[in-house]
Structure formats: structure tokens, C-alpha cells
Image (cartoon, helix red, strand yellow):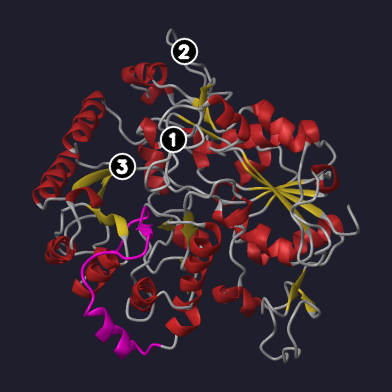
């Protein structure tokens, strides 16, 4: 521990998969904790095993027509570096024979599975393991707000230090082996430093993570609610937040007078403060090298409870940020870090639009025209804003682009929303359609009616969106799903003049559909998360359907 301020290392692990691409993928939850820890007085460092812009990667990939030697698409996305690796231990399947591992349900295996495994390249996505080892050995600490005497521009020798605690995040359940490899190397370099694992995999497959990840502790649920106790327990340090941040003050406790960083209070005293997302500091995206896009989360949770989705389990309560807070964050990353692309991570971005998304987009559009400060933006009344907006043309004015990879609720899209989305620079619009079976007899919940889908597409196209900007997600590979219905849905979506996007089903623990998936799958899903990978079509059980899915994929082109 340096100067009595603990050093906390945050790590984003590798992906182990058959395919992966940087579709606006950042460890937002981990970076949220990093920001809270940094503001709370501790020193923070961040290592990203998926870093597309690692200095050694840039050296190796200096090619023509690529920025810094790394391919960057206009929307900020790009391919991860990858290297073929063996399948995880216990699921080895060779071209000659199947493994005798108990993880395989041999009675349900298809002859095509041999071809599937042999024909796909299972890879590690991200930096080389040796680069990671070197990064661990040469850590650079970013300064805490409580110790401003340390400058980010100081020499590396003054900023290096062994961490007191290491936090590792996790995302997809079937990337578990990537988490394990990451932690194994951490343990090689820092065998006596405690490692705490959190995130989605840790929450959904807790027992598997505890048995296999090599982490010293596995936590579940939202990290913000636990980080104070974790830091205190492992380092003896009490994180503090400062009056200028206005974070976690009890509503019954008067705020101290004055500005600056002279007043601080322990974190974790006020549960109500945790529920107010406006009081959280911005995620520490500044720790990312070459920020080609910024993820934005305007809410937590979702009002729906889809049978295939774990959102309601991970975030049982829906919480929203104010439009002012979200707008200020967008301005922050654009003005201070030159970010042009923003990806909304919300599961329910358009819910209650009059109170949230419409006021936010009104501010973005007015800002793009007036070039005034955010404080002036907030002085506009809703009535005057709408009057001013009606006079603007149908194009985006700021060099900002917005993307919705998590899909939008179709029912909420009307003319006002479609127009504002287009004028403010939405470039990638994904609709959560699921199927074009709108009948009341369908098995899944009906979140959109036929006329609502057609109306939403019409409004988006009238606003100015082109075919290649609008896609509709269609679920494929569900247990007992009739793939002819998927084919029909693809045809209907293409007839509307937008892109059908197949969303291959991943069985997820703690969802309503989980038990059905377990019973229907040819794999042992309960004991090995690897087999939930949608690349394996875990709930498809005959050769004809495997071939059918390949044909459906071709239909979407």
C-alpha cells in the first residue's frame, strides 16, 4: 500500500469463443467501480485483455489505410486480435473421436457436432498472454482525488506499484475459460494478492465460478452496493466521497457548506443514494486507451421479464438517470475526449419517452445548433424546445453518432421519436422484434403488435433512415422452435425494407426458459457453461435443423 492509499487493479479478461468482434463492448460495470474507487481516495489501475490498441498490437499491425495500424470502422467498432487455442479442459473434441468427458450428453450428440467443433476455430480474443504478464509487472497507477499530489504525467517508476486488491469482471457465461486464464496469470505474477471476481458470469453461474475461476472471492449482483465493504475488508481503507461529487449523502444529513474536496463521508451509508444513478460518477472510460466510442447507460433494469432474458434477475428494479445527467455525460466525453460514437447499453431506452429519451434528444439537438453551454440548454422550456426543433431540417448537425445494439422497444417508436433519433445522429437502429408471429396463441410474451411494427418501420423510414441502418432482431434456435416460423419472419422483415438480424438463442441460468433449455439440449448445460454458447446451437437436436439455420442465415443477406 503506497502512502496509506490502497492500489486497486481492475481487469477486463479475455474472451474465449468461436467468434468475437468489438460491437461497442466495454466493461462498463467495472469502469463504474473504478471511478467510484478513484473518487473515494484509492489509487486505481486498469488492464484490458481485450485492448485493441495495445502498444505491441499497434507495432505489429501498422498497415496501410488503418489508423495506428489497427482497423477502426467509422462507428468505432473493430476486430479483436485473436489466436487459436484448444477447447476448454473437459470439452475436448477431436476430428477423430469425441471426448469421454461427462460434460457431453453423448446420447444426444449429433454426427454434425464432430464437424462443428473441428471446423470452428476456438480462439483467445485479445492481447497476448506475455503482454499481459508484462503489463502486470509494470503497472501504472492513476491518481485518486484524495491524493492529488500524484500527477498522471509523473514517471512510470513513481507510479508503479503492486496492487493491494484485484477486481476482475466477467460477461458471457460461456467465456468462463477466458476468466480462468486471466486470473491464472494474475496469480502467477501476484500470488499473494486477493482477487475478487464479479460480473454477469459470476452472478449467473456463481458455483461454477467459485469452483473453477481461481478467484479468492466471487460476488454476485451490483458491485456498487458492495464495493465499500470489499475495499474495507481487504485493505482496511474506508472509501470516501467528496462534496463536489454529491455522492451518497443521506437525505436527512445536511450537506456541508463550501466547494472543493475538503469534506468527505464514508461510502456505503446510504442505500437510497445508490438508487439515485445521477449521483454516481461517470464510468472511468478515461482509463481506456484510444476511446473510439463511449458506452452510455441511461437506466438499469427492464420493465419486462422475457422468458429468455436474465435482465430482471441481474437488475430486479428499474432505475433511471435524468436526461440532464445523461446529456452532461455525452458532452463530457465528446468535448474532453473527442468521442463521436456513443452506444446505448440500455435494455429499455425508449420506455416512458416523454420523461426521458425525448428531453434528452431535444437537448442534444438544440446543443448541436446553438453551440451553447449545457447550463443554457437546461434553461429551455419543453414548449420552446419543441417549437425550436420543428424549425430544424432533417439532418444531424453535431459530429455525434448514436447506436442501439441492445434493441429498442418497437411499441414506443412514433413520429416524434423517429424524427429526433434521425436528427440527433442515430446511425445503428436495432428493433427488438423477436418474431412476426403476432397471434395471441404464440408461446412468448407479446411486446409488439403487427400494426405497431409496421408503423415503427414506416416512421423510421419517413424520418430519413436508410435500409442498412435499421435491423430487426429475430430469435433463432429456441427450444422446440419451428424454424419455418423464423423463415417466415425473415421474409416479412425483408418485405418491409429493413434488415433481418438473427439473434441466436443462448440458454441463460435463472431465466424462465432455462429448465426447458436444459431438458431440450444435447449438452449438459447445468455443469458446463461452455455449452450454452449460441455458436453451438445448444437447443437444436437434429441434422435437418442445423442445415436449416445455415439456410436462414443466407436468407438474411
Q: Do residues under tags 2 and 3 come within 8 Å of each other at their CB atoms?
A: no
Q: Which residues are magenta?
A: 380-409
Where's the C terminus, which quadrant?
top left
Q: Which residue is mark 1?
A: 71
What's the CA distance linking mark 1 and mark 3? Answer: 38 Å
Mark 3 neighbour density, 10 Å: few (under 14) some (14–19) many (20 or more): many
Residue nearest the viewer, comparing 46 with 450: 46
Disc marking residue 94: 2
The numbered mark at residue 485 is none
Which residue lies at the image location 77% right of the left edge and 61% below the top edge?
A: 144
Q: Nearer the viewer, mark 1 or mark 3?
A: 1
Name the residue carrying label 3.
479
The Cα–Cα distance between marks 2 and 1, rounded to whole angstroms, is 33 Å
Is 392 included in the stretch rendered in magenta?
yes
Element under label 2?
Answer: loop
- Residue 67 picture location, percent across and down: 47, 37
The quarter holding residue 143 reads bottom right
Amino acid at each position: 500500500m503506497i502512502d496509506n492509499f490502497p492500489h486497486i487493479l481492475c481487469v477486463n479478461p479475455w474472451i474465449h469463443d468461436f467468434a468475437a468482434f468489438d460491437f461497442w463492448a466495454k466493461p462498463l460495470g467495472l469502469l463504474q467501480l473504478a471511478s467510484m474507487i478513484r473518487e473515494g481516495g484509492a489509487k486505481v489501475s486498469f488492464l484490458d485483455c481485450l485492448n485493441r490498441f495495445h502498444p505491441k498490437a499497434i507495432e505489429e499491425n501498422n498497415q496501410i489505410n488503418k489508423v495506428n495500424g489497427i482497423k477502426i470502422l467509422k462507428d468505432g467498432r473493430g476486430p479483436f486480435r485473436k489466436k487459436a487455442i484448444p477447447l476448454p479442459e473437459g470439452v475436448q473434441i477431436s476430428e477423430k473421436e469425441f471426448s469421454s468427458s461427462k460434460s457431453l450428453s453423448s446420447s444426444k450428440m449429433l454426427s454434425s457436432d464432430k464437424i462443428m467443433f473441428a471446423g470452428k476455430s476456438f480462439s483467445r480474443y485479445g492481447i497476448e498472454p506475455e503482454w499481459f504478464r508484462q503489463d502486470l509487472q509494470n503497472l501504472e497507477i492513476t491518481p485518486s482525488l484524495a491524493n492529488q499530489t500524484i500527477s498522471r504525467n509523473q514517471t512510470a517508476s513513481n507510479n508503479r506499484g503492486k496492487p493491494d486488491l484485484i477486481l476482475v469482471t466477467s460477461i458471457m457465461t460461456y467465456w468462463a475459460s477466458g476468466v480462468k486464464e486471466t486470473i491464472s496469470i494474475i496469480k502467477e505474477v501476484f500470488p499473494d494478492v486477493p482477487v475478487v471476481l464479479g460480473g454477469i458470469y459470476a452472478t449467473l453461474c456463481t458455483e461454477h465460478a467459485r469452483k473453477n475461476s481461481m478467484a479468492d472471492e466471487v460476488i454476485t449482483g451490483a458491485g456498487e452496493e458492495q464495493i465499500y465493504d470489499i475495499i474495507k475488508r481487504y485493505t482496511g481503507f474506508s472509501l470516501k466521497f467528496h462534496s463536489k461529487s454529491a455522492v451518497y449523502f443521506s437525505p436527512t444529513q445536511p450537506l456541508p457548506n463550501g466547494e472543493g474536496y475538503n469534506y468527505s463521508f464514508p461510502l456505503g451509508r446510504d442505500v437510497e443514494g445508490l438508487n439515485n444513478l445521477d449521483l454516481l460518477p461517470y464510468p472511468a472510460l478515461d482509463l481506456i486507451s484510444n476511446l473510439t466510442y463511449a458506452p452510455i447507460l441511461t437506466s438499469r433494469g427492464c420493465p419486462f421479464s422475457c422468458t429468455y432474458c436474465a435482465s430482471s434477475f441481474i437488475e430486479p428494479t428499474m432505475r433511471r438517470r435524468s436526461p440532464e445527467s445523461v446529456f452532461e455525460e455525452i458532452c463530457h466525453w465528446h468535448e474532453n475526449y473527442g468521442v463521436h460514437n456513443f452506444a446505448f447499453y440500455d435494455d429499455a431506452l425508449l420506455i416512458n419517452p416523454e420523461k426521458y429519451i425525448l428531453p434528452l434528444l431535444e437537448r442534444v439537438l438544440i446543443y448541436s445548433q446553438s453551440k451553447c453551454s449545457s447550463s443554457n440548454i437546461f434553461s429551455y422550456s419543453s414548449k420552446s424546445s419543441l417549437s425550436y426543433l420543428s424549425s430544424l431540417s432533417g439532418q444531424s448537425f453535431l459530429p455525434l453518432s448514436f447506436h442501439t445494439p441492445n434493441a429498442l422497444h418497437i411499441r414506443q417508436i412514433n413520429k416524434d421519436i423517429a424524427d429526433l433519433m434521425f436528427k440527433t445522429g442515430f446511425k445503428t437502429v436495432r428493433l427488438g422484434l423477436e418474431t412476426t408471429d403476432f397471434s395471441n396463441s404464440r408461446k412468448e410474451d407479446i411486446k409488439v403488435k403487427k400494426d405497431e411494427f409496421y408503423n415503427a418501420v414506416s416512421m423510421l423510414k419517413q424520418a430519413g433512415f436508410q435500409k442498412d441502418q435499421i435491423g430487426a432482431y429475430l430469435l433463432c434456435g429456441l427450444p422446440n422452435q419451428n424454424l419455418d416460423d423464423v423463415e417466415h419472419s425473415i421474409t416479412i422483415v425483408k418485405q418491409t425494407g429493413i434488415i433481418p438480424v438473427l439473434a441466436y438463442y443462448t440458454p441463460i441460468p435463472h431465466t424462465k426458459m432455462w429448465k426447458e433449455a436444459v431438458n431440450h439440449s444435447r449438452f449438459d448445460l447445468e455443469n458446463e457453461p461452455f455449452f450454452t454458447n449460441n455458436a453451438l446451437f445448444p437447443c437444436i437436436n437434429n441434422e435437418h435443423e442445423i442445415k436449416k439455420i445455415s439456410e436462414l442465415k443466407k436468407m438474411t443477406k
